[in-house]
C-alpha cells in the first residue's frame, strides 16, 4: 500500500510514521511537510531510509494533485496547531487548515483516493469543570479559538466532500496528546524543558483547566484502527479517559523530576481559555474494538521526561525561540485570575 502522510515532520505525524514503519513494513510512506517552525526533519531521522520525504505545502494544488495521484491512502495531519499562536496571527491557520484541507479534498476527489482526516476535540468547545458530560460524536460544534474554528471548518469541508462528491473519508477528533517529539511550545514539553533548563514551569491563570490526556501512540493506533475498520463518512472520537487539571500535571512533572511541587509560576491566562475537554470514546471502543495501552499517566509522563532529558539536541534551539516568543506575546508572571469559574 502507498500512503501519503501530510505533516509527518510534526509531533503526531512523526510518531505515526514511526509506528507504521515498526508495525506495517508493507506500507510505503511518502511524507509531505512544509517544515514550518513546528516541523522538524530530525524527527524522521530514525526512519529516513524507509520513507520518501517531500518538502512542500499542502496548499500547492499541482504538487498535491501529483502526490495524491500516486497514492492509495492520504492521512492528513498537517496543520497550524497551537492555540496561542492563532490568537496572535490567525492567517496561517486559515491558510493551512482551511485552504490546505480543501486542496487535499479536491485531489482525493479527482483521483478517488481513500482519505483520513485528523482533527481535535476542541471543535466541540469546552465543558464546565463540574459537568458530568463528555463530548460524543453528536455534540454540536462550538469552537472557541481561531485554531479550533479553522479545524472545525476543515471537518465540515470533509463532511461536505463526502456527501456531495462521494469522497471515501473517515474523520477522528482526539483529545490532548503527549509523548516524544512534541514541540516545546506545548504545555507538557514546555514544563518538562523548563525544569530541565532550571526555569520554573508556567501555569496559565489558576491552572484549574482540565485536559483529557492521551499518549500519542494510543492516538495513532486508534487512527490505524479507523483506517482498517471504520465506516466511510463516519466520525470517531479518540480519548483514553485521561482527564487531569493543569496544576496537577505541573506538580506531577516537578515531583517526577525530584523538585518541590510548589516550584512553579502562575502567568497571564490565555484569552478565551477553554475550561475543560473530555472525550467519550465509546463508539471507537465498541464498534471497532480499540483500547488504549498507556493507561498509567504517571508512567507515560516519566517516559516522556526521560525522552526530553536524553534528546536535548532535538529541542534546545526551539526552546530559546519559544520562550522569547512567549515573552514578546506579553506573558507575565504573577497573574492568577481565571476567566470563568
Ligand atoms: P504540529 O504543529 O506538531 O505539526 C504540524 C506539522 O504540519 C508540522 O510538521 C508542520 O511543518 C506541518 N505543516 C504546517 N503547515 C503546513 C502546510 N501548509 N503544508 C505542509 N505541512 C505543513 O502538530 P501536531 O500536534 O502533530 O498535530 C497534528 C494534527 O493533529 C493536527 O491536525 C492537529 O490539529 C491534530 N490534533 C493535535 C492534538 C495535540 O494534542 N497535539 C490533539 C488532537 C488533534
Ligand atoms: O505554558 C503553558 N501553560 C499552561 O498552563 C501552556 C503552553 C499551556 N498551558 C495550558 C493551556 C491549556 O489549558 O495547558 C493546557 C494545554 O495547552 P496546550 O498544550 O497549548 O494545548 P491545548 O490548547 O489544550 O490544545 C492542544 O490539544 C488539542 C493542542 O495544542 C491542539 O493542537 C489540539 O487540537
Image: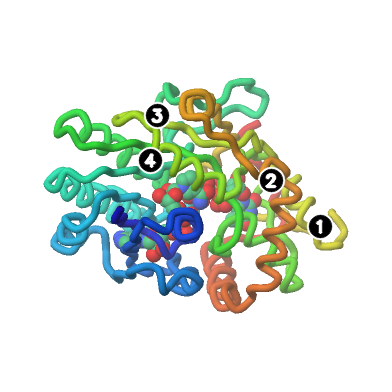
Could you give the CA–CA distance between mark 1 and mark 3, rounded to whole angstroms? 37 Å
Q: Nearer the viewer, residue 232 or 118?
A: 232
Quadrant where ligand 1 appears: bottom left
Q: Farthest residue toward the front?
A: 26
Could you give the CA–CA distance between mark 4 and mark 1, rounded to whole angstroms? 36 Å
Q: Position of residue 290 (x, y in %)?
A: 53, 34
Give the SS element for disc 3: loop
- Residue placed at 54% from the left, 73% from the top? 318
Give the label on residue 246, or none.
2
* Ligand 2 has an atom within 8 Å of the beta carbon of the residue at disc 2: yes
Q: Nearer the viewer, mark 4 or mark 1?
A: 4
Q: Which residue is mark 4?
A: 227
Q: Nearer the viewer, residue 183 or 64?
A: 64
Q: Nearer the viewer, residue 67 or 93?
A: 67
Q: Which residue is mark 3?
A: 141
Could you give the CA–CA distance between mark 1 and mark 2, rounded to whole angstroms? 15 Å
Give the label on residue 256, or none.
1
Q: Is residue 225 left or right of residue 92?
A: right
Examine the rendering and report whether any part of residue 190 can be seen. yes
Q: Position of residue 131 (x, y in %)?
A: 63, 22
Q: Position of residue 41 (x, y in %)?
A: 43, 73
Could you give the CA–CA distance between mark 4 and mark 2, rounded to whole angstroms? 32 Å
Give the SS element for disc 4: helix
Amino acid at each position: 500500500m502507498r500512503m501519503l502522510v501530510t505533516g509527518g515532520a510534526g509531533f503526531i505525524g512523526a510518531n505515526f510514521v514511526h509506528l507504521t514503519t515498526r508495525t506495517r513494513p508493507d506500507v510505503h510512506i511518502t511524507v509531505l511537510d512544509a517544515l514550518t517552525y513546528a516541523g522538524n526533519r530530525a524527527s524522521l531521522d530514525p526512519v529516513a531510509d524507509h520513507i520518501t520525504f517531500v518538502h512542500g505545502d499542502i496548499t500547492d494544488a499541482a504538487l498535491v494533485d501529483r502526490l495524491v495521484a500516486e497514492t492509495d491512502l492520504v492521512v492528513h495531519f498537517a496543520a497550524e496547531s497551537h492555540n496561542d499562536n492563532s490568537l496572535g496571527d490567525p492567517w496561517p491557520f486559515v491558510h493551512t487548515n482551511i485552504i490546505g484541507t480543501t486542496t487535499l479534498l479536491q485531489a482525493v476527489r479527482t483521483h478517488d483516493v481513500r482519505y483520513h482526516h485528523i482533527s481535535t476535540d476542541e471543535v466541540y468547545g469546552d465543558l464546565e469543570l463540574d459537568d458530568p458530560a463528555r463530548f460524543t460524536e453528536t455534540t454540536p460544534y462550538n469552537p472557541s479559538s481561531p485554531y479550533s474554528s479553522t479545524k472545525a471548518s476543515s471537518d465540515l469541508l470533509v463532511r461536505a466532500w463526502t456527501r456531495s462528491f462521494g469522497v471515501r473519508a473517515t474523520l477522528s477528533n482526539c483529545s490532548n496528546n503527549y509523548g516524544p517529539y512534541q514541540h516545546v511550545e506545548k504545555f507538557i514539553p514546555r514544563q518538562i524543558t523548563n525544569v530541565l533548563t532550571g526555569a520554573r514551569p508556567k501555569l496559565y491563570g489558576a491552572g484549574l483547566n482540565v485536559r483529557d490526556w492521551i499518549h500519542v501512540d494510543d492516538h495513532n493506533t486508534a487512527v490505524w484502527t479507523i483506517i482498517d475498520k471504520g465506516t466511510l463518512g463516519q466520525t470517531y472520537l479518540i480519548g483514553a479517559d485521561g482527564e487531569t487539571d493543569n496544576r496537577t500535571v505541573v506538580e506531577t512533572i516537578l515531583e517526577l523530576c525530584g523538585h518541590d511541587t510548589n516550584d512553579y509560576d502562575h502567568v497571564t491566562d490565555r484569552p478565551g481559555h477553554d475550561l475543560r475537554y473530555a472525550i467519550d470514546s465509546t463508539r471507537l471502543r465498541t464498534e471497532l474494538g480499540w483500547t488504549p495501552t498507556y493507561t498509567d499517566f504517571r508512567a507515560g509522563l516519566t517516559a516522556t521526561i526521560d525522552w526530553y532529558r536524553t534528546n536535548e539536541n532535538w529541542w534546545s534551539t526551539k526552546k530559546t525561540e519559544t520562550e522569547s516568543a512567549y515573552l514578546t506575546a506579553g506573558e507575565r508572571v504573577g497573574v492568577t485570575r481565571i476567566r470563568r469559574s
